[in-house]
Image (spheres, helix red, strand yellow):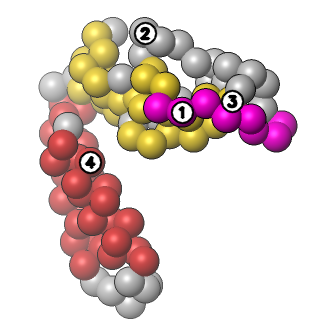
Amino acid sequence: MPAIDNLERALAAADAAGPDHHLAEGVRLVQAELAAALGRIGIEGYSPEGEAFDPAVHEAMAQHPAEGAASGTVVEVYQQGYRLNDTVLRPARVVVAA
């Protein structure tokens, strides 16, 4: 999971460097290959923005008022979660509406 997180950070940095930066394209390809390899063995990522907070699959990192969101709703995902079939390997780290 940390390798995937680092690829996402590298993509964000490369995207910030501008659209003519070719590093983003290369990192995006590596990320896609890694995600496909994990998918072949049944590991999938999930990003629960807009879902009701569930402590079994989410880890609340913060809680604050969010305009237009019901209390207890995930309003931001800091780090996506991963699961293998129905087993949570890592909960999604989220911000929850107060």
Q: Amino acid at mark 3?
A: Ala
**3 vs 1, front mark:** 1
Which numbered disc flags the more N-terminal residue, 2 or 4?
4
Q: Which residue is mark 2?
A: 56
**4 vs 3, front mark:** 3
Which numbered disc flags the more N-terminal residue, 1 or 4?
4
Q: Which residue is mark 4?
A: 5
Task: From this view, report whether residue 76 is shown above or below residue 40.
Answer: below
Q: Which residue is mark 1?
A: 62
Q: What residue range appears in magenta?
A: 61-68
Q: Which residue is mark 3?
A: 97
Work out which residue is located at the far bottom of the displayed protein and give it: 20
Query: In this rendering, does residue 50 appear at all?
Result: no
Q: Is residue 51 left or right of residue 38?
A: right
Q: Residue 56: give x, y in percent of width and height.
A: 43, 9
Around disc 2, counting alpha carbons within 10 Å, would you say few (fewer than 14), some (14 to 19), or many (20 or more)? few
Q: Residue 46: give x, y in percent of width and height.
A: 42, 31
**1 vs 4, front mark:** 1
Q: Amino acid at mark 2?
A: Ala
Q: Amino acid at mark 1?
A: Ala
Which numbered disc flags the more N-terminal residue, 3 or 1?
1
What whole-number distance in Å separates the C-alpha atoms at marks 1 and 4?
20 Å
What whole-number distance in Å separates the C-alpha atoms at marks 3 and 2?
17 Å
Q: Is residue 31 left or right of residue 76?
A: left
On whether residue 62 falls in the magenta region, the answer is yes
What whole-number distance in Å separates the C-alpha atoms at marks 4 and 3?
24 Å
Q: 79 and 60: which one is in front?
A: 60
Q: Residue 19: give x, y in percent of width and height.
A: 43, 84
Q: Which secondary structure lies at badge 3?
A: strand
Around disc 4, counting alpha carbons within 10 Å, would you say few (fewer than 14), some (14 to 19), or many (20 or more)? few
Around disc 3, counting alpha carbons within 10 Å, would you say few (fewer than 14), some (14 to 19), or many (20 or more)? many
